[in-house]
Amino acid sequence: MLGGTFRLLLLLLLLLLLPLRPPGTQGHSGAASSGQEDEEPAAWPGVQRLKEQLRTVGTLSKRYWGLFSCTVWPDHCQDQEAPAPPLGWSLPLQWGRRSLDRLTEWFCRFQDCCTGGGDCRISNNLTGLESDLRVRLHGQHLASELVLRAVRGYLEKPQGDKALALSFHGWSGTGKNFVARMLAENLYRDGLRSDCVKMFISTFHFPHPKYADKYKEELRCQMQETRRRCHQTMFIFDEAEKLHPVLLELLGPHLELRVPETQGVEPPRAIFLFLSNLGGSVINKEVLGLLKAGWSREEITIQHLETLLQAEITVSTDSSFGSSRLVKENLIDFFVPFLPLEYRHVRLCVRDAFLSQDLLYTEEALDEIAKMMTYVPEEEQLFSSQGCKSISQRINLFLP
Ligand SMILES: *[C@@H]1O[C@H](CO)[C@@H](O)[C@H](O)[C@H]1NC(C)=O
């Protein structure tokens, strides 16, 4: 709300700087706009429409401001009670109301008050997601395919009867966070900053086991509030292997099947992402074995890894995640393996980092930076131990 108020104030400040039309022309413009009231606003050419709206705002008197703020923030209405307007005011006031509707509609394109059909905070751009996964994510053909299939299936299903839960596994720097961010950016207008998206990092948000009960209450509140505000939410748990059992227990009911709701009411959707390095070593070992046996990386299928990965997660004793209800009762829909990255993938990450900072690069520079990473195992030197982590910082070091 505060951010919205600030944005609106900025907008009004901007408009105050615009020259106002002389008073004599206002009546005319008012009549003209009343005449066009029934027209479809979308039929107006964009620029003319904007001009009209700017003019409208320019003539906002204190009273119009009151009406406007009343429309946008109904809670603040009481103190806006103004005396009945003098006789001559009724026409401009009526005109003001109409313009006000149009202004509110325009204002709401940037705000959360969108109504009528869709919620403008939710973009669900599957084309964008597909293209991001294909172009910006390197060396993860399995994760790319699985994530797209799972999310598309979930969003295209008319009745979301359960939350979608994906668990990402792999070494650090392999792209788990990157994919989580891609999902947020393509499914929500404001990405990770969206009202509908919440990200929790275990060591940051829930650092002390002794406060687990307090964290549980906070998490419960935050999830409830987010789900109240949005009919499609996304919750990301980074370092899921470090989540306290008390918190894991709280999540169980959120992932479960819901009792069917009232007919005709669209049930809310929720996407849960769990990011962890659990099973990372098993994935790496299996991939190394397959590569040494002559398979090409792209020939590796989910069947090669699925069973091994699940078994490893279930038996891992240093984390509560594997023994939680989420895993035991099959509440996780997909376990998504992130493969260890090779030299050529790191090189692509370096190139992307240069491009994203609008910097020129040479092939030698790409090689030089990619060679700065440590490659394991000692004998084969095949996989980057840090994946593509902190590549952009390395670029800064490399710059003159
Ligand atoms: C979806 O994303 C693509 C690629 O980022 C973009 O070109 C397109 O305009 C987006 N579509 C919508 C409806 O936002």
Image (cartoon, rainbow, N blue to C red):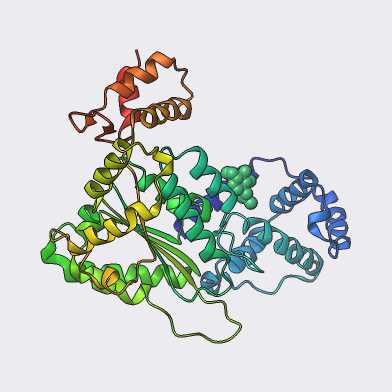
Q: Residue at x 27, y 41 (%)?
A: 289
Frontmost residue, 103 versus 315: 315
Determine the residue located farthest toward the left in the rendered image. Answer: 210
The quarter of the picture where the C terminus appears is: top left
- Whether residue 94 is situated above or below residue 108 in the rendered picture: below
Q: Nearer the viewer, residue 99 or 312?
A: 312
Q: Is residue 211 above or below residue 126?
A: below
Total numbered labels? 0
- x and y percent of residue 24 in the render? 84, 50
* Front residue of this view, candidates 166 and 235: 166
Q: Please give the name of the residue rendered at 22% of the width and 66% of the height, measured from the top-left corner.
A: 215
Q: Is residue 13 above or below residue 221?
A: above
Confirm whether residue 293 shows in the render: yes
For image coordinates 29% across by 21% down, the residue present is 371
Q: Nearer the viewer, residue 337 or 213?
A: 337
Q: Position of residue 352 (x, y in %)?
A: 45, 30
The quadrant holding residue 96 is: bottom right
Residue 235 location, quadrant: bottom left
Q: Position of residue 50 (x, y in %)?
A: 74, 47
Q: Is residue 45 left or right of residue 129?
A: right
Residue 262 image point, x, y percent: 54, 87
Q: Is residue 11 visible?
A: no
Q: Is residue 74 left or right of residue 215?
A: right
